[in-house]
Each structure stands twice: as structure tokens, then as C-alpha cells.
Image (cartoon, rainbow, N blue to C red):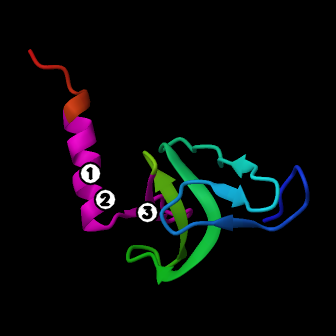
Amino acid sequence: MNCSSCGAAMRLAVDDDCWRCDYCKSVFFPAKNDDGVSVLGVVSDEACPICAAPLAHAALAKLRILYCTRCRGMLIPWPCLCRLLRNCAQEIPEH
């Protein structure tokens, strides 16, 4: 992906949920889909365990996951799943 501001190549850091330009320091955040997932546009080496389509690198709640654009399945690493569940539990109002 190239930077829309200066045309230089942008990079996707391992734990980032956006693309960054090292030249002009621009940042690009992909739009979220209906599932709240930002597909980052990089295909992984892994296939979806349900439909066998290639999984794409994506972000959910600023955490990196693998996402299937065909069946909308998510492969979430255990530490990320724990953080997501903790964040969700904090957002639930107590009665």
C-alpha cells in the first residue's frame, strides 16, 4: 500500500491496527465492516478452518486477528480473546 499523501510505501506493524508511512508519518485506518472488523488488506499464510479461504490480517477493537472475508469467521489468538472479553465485561453496566 502506498501513502495517499506522499506516495511512499506504507508499512503495517505487527501489533498495529493501521498503516504508517515512515516518510511523511501519515497514518491510514481501514474502515470497519459490519462486524466491527478493520480488514488490513494483507493475506495471511493460514486458511479458514471453516471454508478454506485465505485469512486476512485484520483488527478488532484495536487488537490484531485473522479474518475470513468469505464466511466472516475470526481466528483470535488466546491473549487477544482474553483482552476482548475483559473489555466487554467492563462495558456491561452493573444492575
Mark 1: which secondary structure?
helix
Q: Is residue 34 above or below residue 22?
A: above
Asked whether disc 3 touches disc 2, contact meaning CB atoms under 8 Å apart, the reply is yes
Seen from this angle, which residue lies furthest right? Answer: 6
For image coordinates 34% across by 64% down, the residue present is: 76
First in residue order: circle 1 vs circle 3: 3
Give residue 80's mark: 2
In this rendering, is residue 71 above or below 93?
Answer: below
Q: Residue at x 22, y 55 (%)?
A: 82
> Is 68 or 92 nearer to us in this picture?
92
Q: Residues within 10 Å of mark 2 (few under 14, many from 20)?
A: some
Q: Nearer the viewer, residue 51 or 44?
A: 44
Q: Quadrant of the N terminus?
A: bottom right
Residue in the picture at 69% in, 67% down: 11
Which amino acid is tagged 1? Arg
Q: Residue at x 65, y 47 (%)?
A: 29
How many dots with numbers?
3
Horizontal and vertical percent position of residue 43: 60, 74
Callout 3: SS? strand
Q: Which mark is residue 83?
A: 1
- At label 1, counting other C-alpha atoms closer than 10 Å, the crowd grade (few under 14, some 14-19, many 20 or more) is few
Check disc 3: other Cα within 10 Å, few if <14, some if 14-19, many if 20+. many
CA distance separating discs 1 and 3: 12 Å
**Cβ atoms at labels 1 and 2 below 8 Å apart:** yes
Q: Classify residue 9 by image quadrant.
A: bottom right
Left or right placement of residue 64 versus residue 5 in this view: left
Magenta region? 63-89
Q: Amino acid at mark 2?
A: Cys
Is residue 78 found inside the magenta-colored segment of the image?
yes
Query: Which residue bears the numbered disc 3?
Result: 65
Q: Nearer the viewer, mark 1 or mark 3?
A: 1
